[in-house]
Structure formats: structure tokens, C-alpha cells
Image (spheres, rainbow, N blue to C red):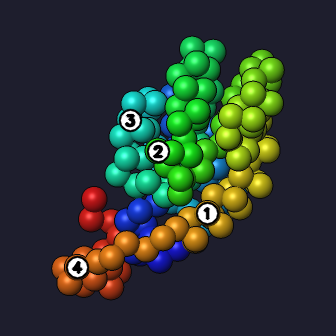
Amino acid sequence: MTVAAAVTARCIVCERTGRWAQALRREAAGATRLHEVRSLADCWEMLDRFPASFVVVELSASQVQPLLARLARWEQEYPLARLAVVAERRLGEYESLMREAGAVWYAASPRELGPMAAMARRHLEQAPEPELGIVERIWSLLPWGGERD
């Protein structure tokens, strides 16, 4: 992923504990930087800032309806973003529902994250690069330029 692409796309992981992000980091082997948030509201806020992101949301029983409502509008609100769902095995009954609603991947175990990590990496590599002004172009050329925010 180029530095400029990082302006429009991130790999956002929305979960309460950090367990899934840790497993995803292992699978990605440092190829993808993860940005963790702890609530759906924070997730949507970050997605508004980075609309071409790859989003991983931990599903809980209380989040089924809010997540489905958001997925119903996903294509219109975030046509360049992709969303994957992770959940405890006991919530496996929601897998087909989440996939049908638009989730590109569903995992019920940290051992199932390898393909998701590869999918995230490919998505981020294809993220559109925004038009940059002179200041942003200079920052993007510096080794630390992508880490300003």
C-alpha cells in the first residue's frame, strides 16, 4: 500500500478485547497495520474519515440488529469499503445472514483469519489514492509521512 492510499483506507478492527486484532496481526505478519476501536460508533466515525477501509467487526448478540441495519446501507454509504465479521462459535447461526447482508468474510475462530488477512492486504493495496496538495505530497514522501494523524 502506498502512503497516499493510507489516507483513504485503513484496516479497522472493532472489538472489545483486542483478541481478534492480535490474531489478525499474527496472520498479517506485519504486512497490514491495524487500527483498533472498541465500539461500533467509533468504527463508523473512523470509516467516515477513511471510506475505502477494510473493516473487521466482532459480532455480539446485542450488535446483530445495529450491524444488519448498517450493512443494509453499506453499498450506498461506503462503496469502496469492505466489511468482515468475526464472532464466537456460539453465534454461528448468524454467519449466512451476515454474508448475505454483505460481509465479505465470516470467522468464528482466530485460526480462520489467514484468508481474511490476505483479503485485507489486497483490498488496501487497491485503495484509491486521493489528490494531494503540495504539503500532503511532501509529507507522503517522508518516511514518517503516513503517520501524521
| Amino acid type, callout 4 | Gly
Q: In which quadrant of the rendered view does residue 8 lie?
A: bottom left
**Amino acid type, label 3:** Asp
For the residues labelled 2 and 4, the Cα–Cα distance comes to 26 Å
Answer above or below: position of 69 versus 47.
above
Q: Secondary structure at mark 3?
A: helix
Label 4: how many Cα within 10 Å (few below 14, some 14–19, many 20+): few
Could you tell me residue 64's position as x and y percent?
Answer: 61, 20
First in residue order: circle 2 vs circle 4? 2
Q: What label sits on residue 133 in the rendered view?
A: 4
Ranked by sequence position, the earlier of labels 1 and 3 is 3
Task: Give the image quarter of residue 108.
Answer: top right
Q: Nearer the viewer, mark 1 or mark 2?
A: 2
Q: Are marks 1 and 3 in contact (CB under 8 Å)?
A: no
- What is the C-alpha distance between the residues marked 2 and 3? 16 Å
Distance CA(mark 4)–CA(mark 1):
25 Å
Write down the residue under mark 2: 77
